[in-house]
Amino acid sequence: MGALGVVFGDIGTSPLYTAAAVVTTARGAGVEADRTFVYGMTSTILWSLTLVVSILYVRLLLRADNDGEGGLLALLGLLRRTLGRARDGRRATVVLTVLGMLGAAMFLGDSVITPAISVLSAVEGLEVVEPSLARFVVPAALVILLGLFLVERFGTRTIGRFFGPVMVLWFATLAACGVRGVAQTPEVLVSVSPHWVLLFFVDHPAAAFLSLGGVVLAVTGAEALYADLGHFGRRPIVRAWAFVVFPALALSYLGQGGHMIASPEAARNPFFSLVPAPLTIPVVVLATLATIIASQSVVSGAFSVVHQSGRLGVLPPLRTVHTSPANSRQIYLPAVNVLLAATVLLVVVTFRSSAALASAYGIAVTLTISITTVVYLAHGWTSRRRLTGSTVVAAPILVVVLVFLAANLAKVGSGGWLPLTIGAVVFVVMVTWWTGQRHVDRGRLALETTVQRVEDVLEAHGSVTRTRGTAVFLSRHSGVVPLALRSMVEQNHALQRHVLLVSWATADRPTVPTSERFQVSTAGSEGVVQVIATYGFRERPRIVRLLSQVQRAAPDTMRGVDLGTATYFVSLSVPRSSYRSSMPRWSQRLFLGLSRLVPDPVETLDLPRERTIVLGRDVPL
C-alpha cells in the first residue's frame, strides 16, 4: 500500500496525457488516428512499458542496490566503490561522476516539469465537462501547485497514510475505464501483439518515429521505482507493479485505443472522453489528487537528490530539515522548495497546457533513463569483467531508449529546450562546486600538517601550556592537524590537556553500520587522540553522539576526556578568488556565491553552540 501511494504516482498518472500527446504529434506529421495507427500506438506504448519498466527497472535495476538503496546516485556510488578497487580506475571514476552529475541534473529538470504537466493534465478535465471552463485551468493549476509547495515543510508523514488508498482508487478507476473502452471495441486487444509496432513504423515511418516523443511519456516515473527502493524494499515495489499498476495501465491504454476507434473525436482527450459523463467531475477530482501525489513524490525525490549530491560533494550541503523523528529519509530542503516552486509556477504560466509541456517532458526522462542504464552496464562489466545475462538484456533496451531520445531531440525547438536548459544550469553548478571544492581542499591541505607531526607544531611555538579540560578539533580530512589547532597554539601558546582530532568522510553507500563507524588511535603526542568516522551519503554527522559511542567503545584511549565540558573547535575554510587559479573568473564568482548557501557548521554537525568556537582561514581558489 505504501509503495502504491508513493512510488507509482508519476507513472500512474501518465495515461492522462500520453495518448493525446502521441495523437497530436502524429497529426502534426499529417497522419490521422485511424484503426491501424491506434493499434500501432497502443502496441508501442504497451511494449515500451514492458521493456523499460518491467524488464529494465523491475527485473534488473531493482536488483542493483547499494546496501538496500536505489537511484542513479546510489548506483553511481556502487560503481565508484568497484572502480576504487580496480587498477587505473581513477580516470573512469571522474568520467562516470560527471555522467552521474548530468543524470542528476536531468532528474531535477524532470522534477520541474512533472508537477506542472501532471496537475495541468488533471485540471484540463474541466474542459470536457464544460468548454467554457477552459479559462480556469491555469489559475486552478497555479493554486493547487502553490498549496503543494506550501505544505512541503510539514513532510509526508501526516498525509502519507492517505496516499495508498487514493492511488488504489485511482488505479481501479483506470482499469474500469479501460474495460469500458475495450468493451466498445474488443478487437483493440490484438494490439498486444508486438508485430503492430513493426507495422506502425512500416506504414507511417516519420510519424511513428516522431510519436516516440509522446510514447515515452508512458514510462515517466520509472526512475521513482528505483529511487524509492530504500523506502520500501524490492518485493513490495515488484508486487505492486505486477499485480496492480501494470494491469491497470495496460487496460487504460487499451481502453483509450478502443474508444478512439469507436469515437474518433475522442482523440483530443482520450482519457476523460472515456469517463461516463455523470462521473466526470469525481474523476477530475480524483485525477487531481493523484497528480498532487505524483508531484509530491517527485518533489520529495528532488530533495533526496540534492541532499545526496551535497553529501557526495557535487552540490553545496544545504540546510536540511528532518520532518519525521521515525524516518530519517523524510527530509525538507527550504531553499530547494522555494526554487522549485518559483520555477514550476513559471513553467505553468509559460506553457499553459499539458500538450505544450509534452514536448519538454520526454527529453528529461529519456536522458535520465539512458544515463542510468549506461552506469548499470558499466557496473555490471567492472564487477564481473564478462558479459552476463543482465548486460545482454540491458544493452538492447539501451538502444531502444536512445531511439526514444533521438525522437525527442526533434522537439527541442517546441519545448525540449526547457529541460535541457534546466539540466545545463544545474550541471554547470555541480561541476563548478565540485571543481571549486577540490581547489579549496588542496589549498587547505597545503596549510595543514600531518597528525604525525603534531609534536612539531607544539615545539615550533616555544613553550605551550597544557591547561585542564578537553578540546575537540574537527576537520573533514583525516591524518592532518586542523587549522583551528594551529591557530590556538600560534595565538595563545596553550592547549587543553586532552585533545581529540575528529575527522569524517562520506562513503559511496547510503549508510554505514555502527561497527564500521569509527577508528580510534593515539596521535603520538601525550593526550592527543585521533578519531576517524565514516558516514553514508544519506546520513548526517552528529559529532556529540559519535564521541559518546567512541568513549563507550574505547574507555582506555578516552580516559580523562570529559565530553560534558569539552570545547569544540571548527576549522572553517573561507574561499577567496585568485588570479592564479585555473578556474575562470565567472566560475570562481559562482563558487563563492554557492559557498554562501552552506549552512552553519554548528547546526549541521549538531554541536553545542555555547561550547563551540569557529575559526576561519582564507583559502585561495
Image: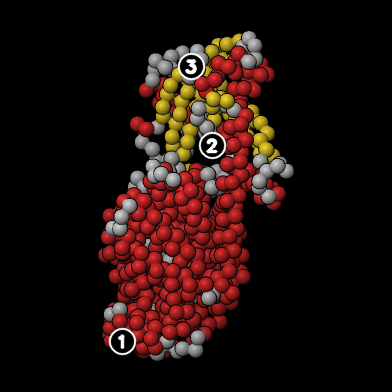
Q: Amino acid at mark 2?
A: Thr
Mark positioned earlier in the residue sequence (1 or 2): 1
Q: Which residue is mark 1?
A: 185
Q: Amino acid at mark 1?
A: Thr
Would you identify the image quadrant in which residue 15 lies?
A: bottom left
Q: Amino acid at mark 3?
A: Gly
Q: Is residue 205 left or right of residue 583?
A: left
Q: Residue at x 36, y 51 (%)?
A: 382
Mark positioned earlier in the residue sequence (1 or 3): 1
Query: What is the C-alpha distance between the residues marked 1 and 2?
Result: 60 Å
Q: Residue at x 70, y 42 (%)?
A: 580
The crowd level at tag 1 (other Cα within 10 Å; few <14, some 14-19, many 20+) is: some
Q: Which residue is mark 2?
A: 604
Q: Quadrant of the N terminus?
A: bottom left
Would you identify the image quadrant in which residue 50 lies?
A: bottom left
Q: Residue at x 31, y 75 (%)?
A: 251
Q: Toward the viewer: 314 or 132?
A: 314
Q: Secondary structure at mark 1?
A: loop
The crowd level at tag 3 (other Cα within 10 Å; few <14, some 14-19, many 20+) is: some
Is residue 182 shown above or below 506?
below
